[in-house]
Each structure stands twice: as C-alpha cells, then as structure tokens.
Image (cartoon, rainbow, N blue to C red):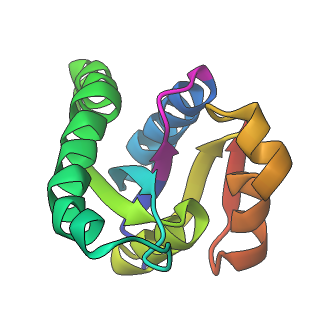
Amino acid sequence: MPESIVVGLDGSESSGRAADAAADAARHHGLRLVLACVVPWSPYSFTTAEENERRSVEKEREASDARDRVLAPVAARLAEAGDLRIEGVVRHGHPAETLVTLARENDAAWITVGRVGQSRVRTLLFGSTPSSLIQLSPVPVLVVP
C-alpha cells in the first residue's frame, strides 16, 4: 500500500503549485508528503584533484541553500494548514533519476512536479524533468501547470 507522494521542488511558481496539489491529495488519501529538492550534479564531471577536495564543502553549501531557500518556505506554508505529515529531502544528482529513487524509497503512490522549472534554457538543451520522469518512473507522474 502506498505511503507517500513525492513532490519535486525547484523554487519555481510551478513547483509551488505542484506542492499545493500534492498536499491536497495527501490530506485526502492520508499519505505522507515528501518534499524533494534535487541539486543537479554529476559524479562523472571532469575535475582536478583540488576541485574534488572542495566539492564536499560545496555540495553541503548547495544542500543547505536548497533547504533554506526552496524546501523550508514551502514546508512552512503547507504545515500552516495542519493535518499533514511532511518530510523534506535534499539530494544531489540527476533530477528525474533522483525523484524516481525517492519514490521507491518512500513507497510513493505518485510523483508530482511542476511543468515549467527554473531554467528554460537548460530545458531546451537537456530536456525537462517531467519528460524524463514520464520515461523513467515506475509510478504515475502528475505534472501541474
């Protein structure tokens, strides 16, 4: 039996609407809400030894910034309405692959994301997270405009 709904957040208005839709559904179905912010990162990038030494500090700074700037405001806003179990998660990785992993780890009924994220240029170059999720996800994907 599914236990949660995973929501991909990136700080955009669209991801805020996705969080609202998922919160309503979580309340209705008695599911836990997993708010997830994925900081794009690839372990396969070419770096120098000096850059590798600094990378762990940089990754923690990025995660802290994502918690403060993206997750905390949405979690606080949704918690005000009450009657909702909320968990916040920040991870580094490929956004769609990481959201799929979180869905599996949290026995998600579905994944909810906004249709348009922060970077339209990045979407044109690399494809969108919703499109990738539709291809990769073992659970339904709700894309909110």
Residue 56 falls in image quadrant: bottom left
Please tell me which residue lies in front, 93 or 45: 45
Residue 118 pos. (x, y %): 61, 31
Q: Is residue 110 visible in the rendered structure shown here?
A: yes
**143 horizontally vs 4: left or right:** right
Residue 13 pos. (x, y %): 58, 20
Give me the residue at 57% from left, 35% from top: 18
Q: How many marks?
A: 0
Q: Is residue 127 visible in the rendered structure shown here?
A: no
Instruction: Tell me the quadrant of the picture where the N terminus can be found.
Output: bottom left
Please tell me which residue lies in front, 71 or 31: 71
Please tell me which residue lies in front, 27 or 91: 91
Residue 114 falls in image quadrant: top right
**105 horizontally vs 24: left or right:** left
Give me the residue at 74% from left, 65% from top: 132
**Residue 3 magenta:** no
Image: 69 above or below 126? above
Instruction: Tell me the quadrant of the picture where the C terminus can be found.
Output: top right
Image: 86 above or below 100? above
Toward the right, the furthest residue is 124
Residue 23 falls in image quadrant: top left
> What range of the chain is rendered magenta?
7-13
Image: 53 above or below 144? below
**39 horizontally vs 142: left or right:** left
Residue 45 pos. (x, y %): 50, 72
Give me the residue at 47% from left, 69% from top: 98
Give me the residue at 77% from left, 36% from top: 121
Image: 2 above or below 130? below
Residue 95 pos. (x, y %): 54, 60
